[in-house]
Amino acid sequence: QIPDSFPATAQRPEYIPNRISDPNYVRIFDTTLRDGEQSPGASLTSKEKVDIARQLSKLGVDIIEAGFPAASKDDFKAVKQIAMEVGNAVDKDGYVPVICGLSRCNEKDIRTAWEAVKYAKRPRIHTFIATSPIHLEYKLRKSKEQVIEIARSMVKFARSLGCEDVEFSPEDAGRSDREFLYQILGEVIKAGATTLNIPDTVGYTAPTEFGQLIADIKSNTPGIENVIISTHCQNDLGLSTANTIEVFHYLFCSTWGTCRLRQVEVTVNGIGERAGNAALEEVVMALKCRGEQVFGGLHTGINIKHISMTSKMVEEYTGLHVQPHKAIVGANAFAHESGIHQDGMLKHKGTYEIISPEDIGFERSNEAGIVLGNLGVLYFTCVMLFVYAQKHNLILQPAPWHSGRHALRQRLGELGYELQDEQLENIFWRFKAIAEQKKRVTDADLRALVSDEVFQP
Ligand code: KIV
């Protein structure tokens, strides 16, 4: 017998750490193992999924979307194993992540998802159905009324299985009709949904538009004050992080103080369908760096020192390489190549870094992230500096050239070589000649240069 309605209460309060009741707390819902694994070219074994889930728990994510249990036997197995293991590993502060399984809006999917997640201390079913005109007409071939009825009855069905935490997503919300969204969301709230996730499924919206969409949903959906609102932004126009962050602005800032938009969906390294999703590390670090000044003190529970390790693990297991200039976790994110930047870095790291790489567990090859690079960059820098100095009537110091030597001396020192000025001078010109030919001068090149200079007969 399915009851008519369910209270939208917080489930299993004993495992919900105090941090969740903090009004400025933003829940991080990680979907690396579900949307992330849908990336072309990525596929993970059950063991790899469990390893990543353990790492996500160490990272402190609030909700792990562990997979789509009805999609395959392997997916079911992995989600169940994650629910049993990671979903029961309560830490000393009482924290254990919610383990979530995705399902379409049908009884078979929902039952399968429940069978997989129910072993967790905090299980969640996430069910979705499309709401945009193009999906209704071509994919579902259903009317709005039919879709509302399916969504309402399936959320109710999920609650009837004993699941106290049900998330609902109107797929392609970014291109859906507003009035229809208010209506369907109002109905699923009545049916017992506890989180409403608003996906920009095809990454179509611009930041102000997406922010306004969430604000309108918040203002017009009956019963919304009793549930958590969430965002899920895809990256087709490269706007996923900007869209997610924009919503903080609209809803988390002071005038919206009591709003319950408190969840963002993200993936490690931003992997996911097509161009991927909002990247966990970008959203988290934006709040960490600017939360106080720009977003009214909003913060997450992420242990940022595990960010780099988690990124590397996901990169290695999925085989999806992180582009070198990727924000926060790219190999170049803390590397400095031009002479002026190197000079600044050697004087004070804050000149060119807003994040300390050690804080996110990033290990760089030398203390100031100095990359010994090509002469062209150095030359260009000097010319620009010269032009600037002329224009502004400044007296030009030979700092950029010195910074090249300075950086070289510093790196050689780190490699254990203390050279006389004359030796350094000789090596410096040969180093530049190599730098002109190669993109990067490696430590092995430097050792060879020193060995030629110091040990030549
Ligand atoms: O992009 C999307 O719409 C989704 C939903 C299932 C949340 O991944």
Image (tube, rainbow, N blue to C red):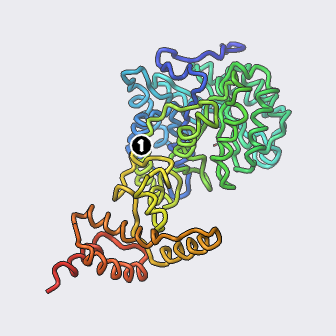
Image position, residue 220 (x, y; %): 82, 27
Who's the residue at 40% across and 25% down the image? 88
User: In this orientation, which residue lies closer to the viewer: 318 or 117?
Assistant: 318
Q: Label 1 belongs to which residue?
A: 359
Q: Nearer the viewer, residue 355 or 90?
A: 355
Q: Quadrant of the C terminus?
A: bottom left
Count of numbered marks: 1
Task: Work out which residue is located at the far left of the displayed protein and give it.
Answer: 457
Left or right of residue 51: residue 223: right
- Badge 1 marks a residue whose secondary structure is helix
Q: Amino acid at mark 1?
A: Asp
Residue 395 point in image, percent of width and height: 54, 70
> As rendered, which of 63 and 450 lies closer to the eye?
450
Considering the image in quadrants, where does the N terminus appear?
top right
Q: Quadrant of ligand 1?
A: top right
Residue under the point 47% across and 14% down: 14
Up-down relation of residue 217 to residue 365 (above or below)? above
> Residue at horizontal 54%, vertical 48%?
36
Q: Position of residue 60 (x, y in %)?
A: 45, 33
In the picture, residue 52 is in which quadrant?
A: top left
Q: Residues within 10 Å of mark 1 (few under 14, many from 20)?
A: some
Q: Position of residue 424 (x, y in %)?
A: 28, 75
Asked if one can make out residue 220 in the rendered structure from this viewpoint, the answer is yes
Q: Is residue 411 above or below residue 382?
A: above
The reply to whether residue 105 is visible in this rendering is no
Q: Residue at x 78, y 37 (%)?
A: 213
